[in-house]
Image: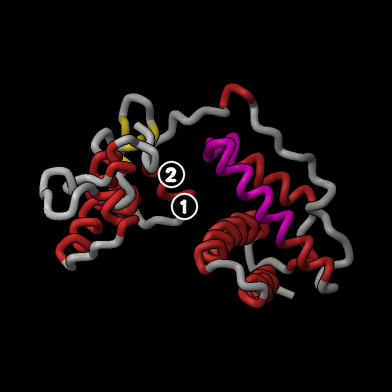
Amino acid sequence: MLFSETAEKFYDYMASIERSPRTIEVYTRDLGYIRRFLEERKNGPVYTEDITQEDLEAFMRNVKEVKQYSANTRSNYFYTLRSLYAFAYKKGLVDRNIAASMDFMRMPKKERTYLIERSEIAEKLGYKNPMSLDNYMRRRNFSWDSRQKMFVLRPSATRQSCIAISCRCMVHRRRRLSSPIHAGRCGREGNRETSRFCQPHRTGRLYEE
């Protein structure tokens, strides 16, 4: 069976166990890259049963020494191969699981760092470009700190969250809700200044500074 056909069966299996579309997309991207490497190495279409452990190890050396991909990226490829061959062996598509005997790919301590670029983070999470990731994080009150090389909570996010919740209390007030519970939380009924911000929100019991 062609490697590409084995990969297609693997995608179908992932969908059948309700893996997320993004997870399947990442597997598709990774296995597509692996397939192209193997086809170049063997000068033609690759059959799953003809692939050896040496071929897989050659791929891992290529992404480390030639492509110089980060340890996180190499680890993703490693576990993609492990998952594919575990599936193929379980379904009887291969005689043995050659990926299971590959050495575990440990991450060197010097490479375990968060100092990575937004483009790499966006690629890992399946976003088309860093701008899409920025928009997603901005809606959750995070912004990119270029000095720390990480997403951080915006300073104004806490106050904005309190205001948003307080606005809901103002809606209750406009509806003339006179519940003792609500009156106790939002201040005296009819006093616009004291009901502007709910007491629990002002004291930070819901959102800590």
The kind of secondary structure element at disc 1 is helix
- Expressed as whole percent of the image width and height from the top left, the position of residue 115 reads 44, 29
Q: For the magenta stretch, what is the residue range? A: 63-83
Query: Which residue position is annotated with label 2?
Result: 121
**Residue displayed at 60% across by 68% down:** 19
The amino acid pointed to by label 2 is: Ile
Q: Is residue 77 magenta?
A: yes
Q: Is residue 154 above or below residue 133?
A: above
Asked whether 6 or 209 is in front, the reply is: 209
Name the residue that disc number 1 marks.
125
**Which image quadrant for residue 38?**
bottom right
Q: Main secondary structure of the magenta part?
A: helix
Q: Is residue 157 left or right of residue 101?
A: left
Disc 2 residue crowd, few under 14, some 14–19, many 20+, Cα 10 Å: some
Which colouring convention does the figure follow?
Answer: secondary structure
In the current view of this chain or complex, which residue is farthest to the top?
Answer: 110
Residue 200, horizontal then vertical, whole percent: 33, 42
